């Protein structure tokens, strides 16, 4: 099993355990903060299961129906994850405001504190593991999951603080106010996840720094006089690059032109990490056909 899949299995297992514990204590205690954390863990479980499904299908080879594979399942998973986080945050916000308007007394404070301490410790271990996997694989889904559980870690810590304050002061509004803070933080954390996923679904180009490195490789090739129509796009862990190259020698053989194109592909692929699948299409021109095909747009 790939490391990315192991990460989603681990996060799903942790989320399932936390859902059961938090829901029980949240319902018994009447704590909005604990209940909000339980709902967040339930959504974590759903998201982690979907992430496993997305990773499993995204790595499938191209077939008759999907000629370029299913790599866009990765950014789609990130957008769905960010959306679910935002919706759950809005629900928590609603519940917190409702408690401010209609205050209720919290119970089973000691049990709630123990549950949140356990939650912080378990989630902290999971975040460390997900960060390790994200660093090793640079997978977008795992990076989003790591960021998601990191927000959970902070929110769980905030709930724990709230329970301590309510336990010692008896001020019930602290729970609701902290619930509002958690909701705002969740939305703030979800925006970058959704943004990156949407950009990939829209075929965002490589970073300008990477494009300049590709240009440098093309310009350093002595057999090429010029190039045009350089296009790039990112789709999950896949990178697509296409370019038209014009050869200095108009009478170059197809064999020699192909050898040079292969050499360029090797150099360009070396710019990226091994976990990235780089697809390069080089159109070999014996003469500059830019004027015939239309002027190239500048970016």
Image (cartoon, helix red, strand yellow):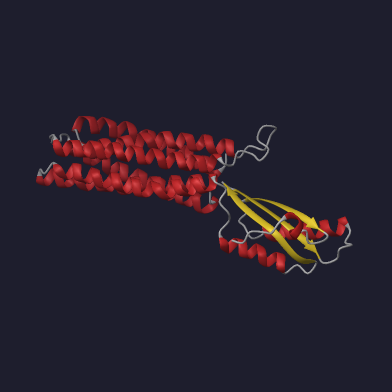
Viewer-nearest residue: 197 or 294: 294
Residue 207 appears anywhere in the view = yes
Q: Residue furthest left?
A: 170
The answer to whether 109 appears left or right of 14 in the picture is left
Q: Residue at x 62, y 57 (%)?
A: 272
Q: Residue at x 63, y 37 (%)?
A: 60
Residue 292 lies in quadrant: bottom right
Image coordinates for residue 20, horizontal then vertical, percent: 32, 31
Residue 55 lies in quadrant: top right
Q: Is residue 59 above or below residue 261?
A: above
Residue 295 lies in quadrant: bottom right
Image coordinates for residue 188, horizontal then vertical, percent: 35, 49
Q: Residue at x 60, y 38 (%)?
A: 70
Image coordinates for residue 8, horizontal then vertical, percent: 48, 39
Viewer-nearest residue: 233 or 291: 291
Q: Residue at x 48, y 35 (%)?
A: 50
The answer to whether 135 appears left or right of 178 in the picture is right
Image coordinates for residue 279, horizontal then vertical, percent: 68, 50
Viewer-nearest residue: 286 or 66: 286
The answer to whether 68 appears left or right of 96 in the picture is right
């Amino acid at each position: 099993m790939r490391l990315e899949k192991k990460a989603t299995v681990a996060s799903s297992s942790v989320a399932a355990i936390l859902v059961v514990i938090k829901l029980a204590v949240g319902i018994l205690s009447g704590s909005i903060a604990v209940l909000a954390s339980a709902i967040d863990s339930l959504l974590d479980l759903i998201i982690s299961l979907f992430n496993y499904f997305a990773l499993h299908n995204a790595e499938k080879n191209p077939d008759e129906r999907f000629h370029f594979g299913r790599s866009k399942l990765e950014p789609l998973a990130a957008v769905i994850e960010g959306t679910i986080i935002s919706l759950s945050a809005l629900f928590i916000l609603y519940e917190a405001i409702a408690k401010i308007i209609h205050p209720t007394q919290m119970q089973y404070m000691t049990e709630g504190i123990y549950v949140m301490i356990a939650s912080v410790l378990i989630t902290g271990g999971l975040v460390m593991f997900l960060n390790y996997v994200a660093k090793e694989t640079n997978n977008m889904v795992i990076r989003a999951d790591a960021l998601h559980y990191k927000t959970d870690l902070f929110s769980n810590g905030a709930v724990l603080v709230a329970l301590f304050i309510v336990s010692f002061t008896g001020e019930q509004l602290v729970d609701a106010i902290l619930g509002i803070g958690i909701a705002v933080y969740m939305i703030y954390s979800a925006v970058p996840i959704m943004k990156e996923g949407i950009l990939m679904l829209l075929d965002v180009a490589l970073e300008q720094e990477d494009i300049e490195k590709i240009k440098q490789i093309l310009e350093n090739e002595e057999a090429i006089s010029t190039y045009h129509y350089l296009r790039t796009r990112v789709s999950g862990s896949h990178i697509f690059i296409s370019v038209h190259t014009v050869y200095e020698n108009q009478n170059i053989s197809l064999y020699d032109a192909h050898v040079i194109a292969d050499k360029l592909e090797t150099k360009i692929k070396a710019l990226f990490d091994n976990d990235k699948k780089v697809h390069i299409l080089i159109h070999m021109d014996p003469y500059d056909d830019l004027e015939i095909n239309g002027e190239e747009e500048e970016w």
